[in-house]
Image (cartoon, helix red, strand yellow):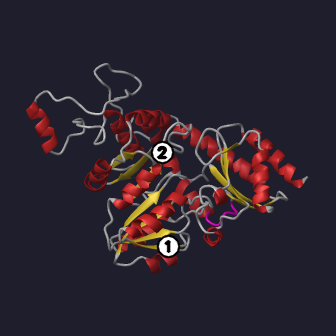
Amino acid sequence: MKTTWNKKTNLVHAGNRRSQFNEVSEAIFLTQSFVYETAEDAEKRFASDLPNDDFIYTRYGNPTIAMFEDKIAAIEGAEAAFATASGMAAVNGALMSMLSAGDHVVAARALFGSCLYILENILPSFGVRVTFVDGTDINQWKKAISQETKAVFFESISNPTLEVIDIKAVANIAKSVGALTVVDNVFTTPIFSNALSLGADVVVYSATKHIDGQGRTLGGVILGSEDYIRNTVEPFMKHTGGSMSPFTGWVLLKGLETLDLRVQAQSDSALEIAKSLIGHESISSVIYPGLEAHPQYDLCREQMKKGGTVIAFELLGGKEAAFSLMNSLELVLISNNLGDAKSIITHPATTTHQRLSADRRQQLGITQGLLRLSVGLEDSKDLIKDLSSALGNLVR
């Protein structure tokens, strides 16, 4: 792999391996295990640290999955990566593999519902102490992080209220006590990401979202140093069974080739749509990191240049208005995914964050009137027209 390639080139060429047939499109190695020339060869492979091309079992490693791992590591600027069965397998694996009973984690309180479940329920059940803070308040991070802290965790842009966290500032505080910074970068995407260069130690993605980008498969990935991936994550993941399938790896390889084109276009459309929603009589607020009115606008511009592909907005009429708008849309789909080529709208209070108490949702800003819009690849004018028509129905 050429280290001088730029990100767009790496998306197409980095990490690619060709078989003896010299195929153009990466091969799918749909196999559970691999054949050894001799019994001695099998013994040798199992007994030693494996070179990159010595595979023994797909749960441990596979040529197609290795191509995906190498490619996304090159894009992200990471030493190594481990591909997982889903985005939540990546979050769980990144944290569980490094933590033990008695360890302390500090996390932003604004997180995806399943991430909150891991931090509020699973980790404490194994004796890990977790402290939640307002992720945008650096002073709260300073007060919460101590010499006992083993890791900090946050989403670079929170789901669904789109708070932008100062990665460099939080990472510096964590480093001062020897804690690792784990960043969920799903809303930022590998294209707009600078997390590792800003001081993060570990980055996780739900590849289900933008990396696939077409709603086809589940997948995730953990990225970090060679030592962390090989000696901490890999033993945990390969023995607990959270590895990616070869077919998924191939689908995601194909997704990476067009990732830059897709998210750049989606982000440009998202900005247009967000601006079109401002000032509507049925909308109390529009939340988009690319808008100057966003509280972390300057930080967003510094960390990722563009505002991303997701918009949140709050309707004055609460749940009734939110449901009415969703049901009036003709082009935008009702679903709970994001990062897709198709535009998708979600009501977080009754779906992705419904298990939280009403008080907790209120604390996080997840009101009954809040909607999350993932902008797809449709013409932005058509999307604006669809939203405008649905909003018009509310006024009537």
Label 2 or label 1, whichever comes before in sequence order: 1
Is residue 294 highlighted in magenta? Answer: yes
**Residue at 26% in and 55% down:** 227
Give the dominant element type of the magenta stretch: helix, strand or loop.
loop
**Residue at 11% in and 38% down:** 43
Where disc 2 sits, the SS reads loop
Q: Residue 13, percent across and down?
A: 40, 33
**Residue at 26% in and 52% down:** 235
Q: Which residue is mark 2?
A: 207
Q: Amino acid at mark 1?
A: Phe
Q: Which residue is mark 1?
A: 132
Q: Nearer the viewer, residue 46 or 386?
A: 46
Is residue 336 something one can see in this rendering? yes
Q: Residue furthest right?
A: 396
Within 10 Å of disc 1 (Cα), the crowding (few <14, some 14-19, many 20+) is many
Q: In the rendered image of this protein, does residue 388 appear above or below residue 298?
A: above
> Label for residue 36?
none
Q: Amino acid at mark 2?
A: Ala
Split into 4 quadrants, where in the image is the N terminus? top left
Where disc 1 sits, the SS reads strand
Q: Residue 106, percent across and down?
A: 44, 71
Give the side of residue 341 with respect to residue 69, left or right: right
Is residue 66 highlighted in magenta? Answer: no
Q: How many labels sit on residues?
A: 2
- What span is colored magenta in the figure? 292-296
Q: Quadrant of residue 70?
A: top left
Give the side of residue 213 with respect to residue 330, left or right: left
The Cα–Cα distance between marks 2 and 1, rounded to whole angstroms, is: 26 Å
Q: Quadrant of residue 368?
A: bottom right
